[in-house]
Amino acid sequence: MEVKKLVRETGVIVVACILLGAAVNFSLVRRFFAGEFREAYIDREKYAGLRFITLAEAGDLFARGLAVFIDSRMRGDFVSGHIPGALSLPLDEVKDPADVGERLKQGPLSLSAEKTLVVYCEGEDCQTSVALAKLIHGQGFRDIRVLMGGWAEWRAAGLPVEESP
């Protein structure tokens, strides 16, 4: 009898924990079931060459001039401040994925598909950098990195900042 009682009480505690956790995090649970986080994941086979990097890795690439930084935030945010030399490519302005390839491969940039690109957005909760990185990958670029902490972490770390005139 003692074992049955212990198993039953353990089950009640587990169920209570699950319900309490779901209640406390209701907004996140709702967003998960709405599919909001699906775009944040990267299928390694489908998106080979696309990976997340830390602030230290991004800072090193910046200091050594080994990458082109791409800001996926809205243009107004870019104007108020961005990583020096970054290209503004707001995800909300992309109407056709081919537009991304044209902007990167033609014009004054003329980037080759082998160039290392670092895409960033506002911060950790922002998903525009991941979505834009996937679009860029679809245009033939293969060395794409997403700065996990984004602009917020870059600025908080006191790294170089450029403001548009």
Image: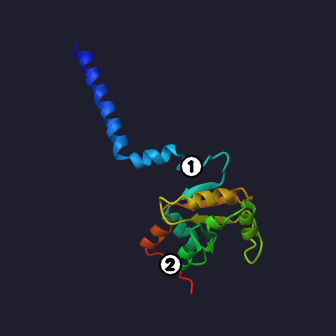
29 and 80: which is toward the camera = 29
Placement of 93 over or under 27, stated as above or below: below
Q: Using the image, tell me which numbered label, if any, was put on residue 165.
A: none
Q: Earlier in the sequence, mark 2 or mark 1?
A: 1
The residue lying furthest to the bottom in this view is 165
Front in this rendered view, residue 66 or 129: 129
Asked whether the residues under the numbered discs 2 and 1 touch, taking CB atoms below 8 Å apart as contact, a structural biologist would say: no
Mark 1 neighbour class, 10 Å CA radius: few under 14, some 14 to 19, many 20 or more = few
Residue holding disc 2: 160
Q: Position of residue 158 (x, y in %)?
A: 44, 75
At x 56% / y 68%, what residue is drawn?
73
* Residue 157 shows in the view: no
Secondary structure under badge 2? loop
Tell which tag, 2 or 1, sits nearer the viewer.
1
Direction from residue 1 to residue 55 in the image, left or right: right
Q: Point out the image quarter for the N terminus.
A: top left
Percent coordinates x, y for residue 12 in the rendering: 29, 27
**Distance from the alpha carbon under mark 2 to that under mark 1:** 29 Å
Helix, strand or loop at label 1? It is loop
* Relative depth, front residue between 4 and 146: 4
Looking at the rendered structure, the kind of residue marked 2 is: Pro
Residue placed farthest to the left in the image? 2
Q: What residue is shown with label 1? A: 41
Q: Position of residue 139 (x, y in %)?
A: 74, 59
**Considering the image in quadrants, where does the C terminus appear?**
bottom right
Kind of residue at disc 1: Tyr
Q: Is residue 1 left or right of residue 152?
A: left
Count of residue discs: 2
Q: Residues within 10 Å of mark 2 (few under 14, many from 20)?
A: few
Position above or below: 90 against 127 = below
Q: Residue at x 47, y 60 (%)?
A: 124
Q: Residue at x 26, y 24 (%)?
A: 9
